[in-house]
Image (spheres, rainbow, N blue to C red):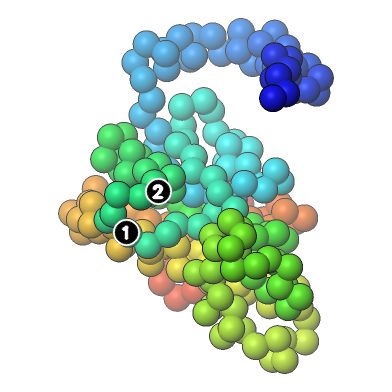
Amino acid sequence: MPSLDPAIPDELRAGFDRFRRGRFWSEHERYRRLDRDGQRPTALVVACSDSRAAPETIFDAEPGDLFVMRNVAGLVPVYEPDTRSHSASAALEYAVLALEVPAIVVLGHGRCGGIAAVLDERDPLTAMDYLGTWVAGLRDLADGLDAEDWVDPARRHQALELQSVEQSIANLRTFPWVRSREQTGHLTLHGAWFDIGLGELHGLTASGWVLLPDA
């Protein structure tokens, strides 16, 4: 069995050194307070694992501000009360019941590879692939976006990215403790979509998606 290299990649080690010499020391009191008092994040952000769409960067968040759950395509599964392991549901449960976050934001983004995997007509993934199984819940949405009805494939791709956020919000409401806290006014649910190239943020309203103006 190959041994593990105790070192980390040079780029990451250099980044840690910069962090420790810079931000960590300039915000040392904040880190000491978080270590002593624990975290009280203002929101749970459900986001994609994509390296271009980090919620902490997009929302210019400080350490301790956000509890972040990231996975391929930023999906929330439906509530499944069984004894199997559910990573996304466990993170959601911890954020809502232990941390009592007052808000959940489902954050989609442009050029999402997970969404592209759903739309890829070559279907490079078999039904047994982890990724194929994970994004399978979006197949029906994709089927509703008939490729022949879209002159621009990029617009179809974006449409599924937006619909994916909407479905994840609907799935959030299948969790009884999310639903009850929302109904009592202790929790709000939000949808957002980030345009990587333009640096724009779109928000989901009762009447549809809108470009959020600069504050």
Rendered image quadrant of residue 193: bottom right
Number of residues whose C-alpha sits closer than 10 Å to that of mark 2, classed few (under 14), some (14–19) or many (20 or more): some
Mark seen at residue 80: 1
Secondary structure beneath label 2: loop
First in sequence, mark 2 or 1: give its number. Answer: 1
Residue 180 lies left or right of residue 35; in this view the side is left
Is 88 placed above or below 137 here? above
**Rendered location of residue 71, percent (x, y):** 56, 49
Q: Which amino acid, by three-letter code, is at mark 1? A: Glu
Residue 158 seen in the current view: no
Rendered image quadrant of residue 19: top right
Residue 127 lies left or right of residue 91; in this view the side is right
Q: Which amino acid, by three-letter code, is at mark 2? A: His
| Most distant residue in the right direction | 10
Name the residue at 54% across, 9% down: 28
Rendered image quadrant of residue 58: top right
Question: How many angstroms separate mark 2 from mark 1 (CA)?
Answer: 9 Å
Reading the image, the residue beneath label 2 is 86
| Most distant residue in the bottom direction | 148
**Rendered location of residue 65, percent (x, y):** 46, 32
Name the residue at 73% across, 68% down: 124
Q: Are marks 2 and 1 in contact (CB under 8 Å)?
A: yes
Secondary structure beneath label 1: loop
In the rendered image, which quarter contains the N terminus? top right
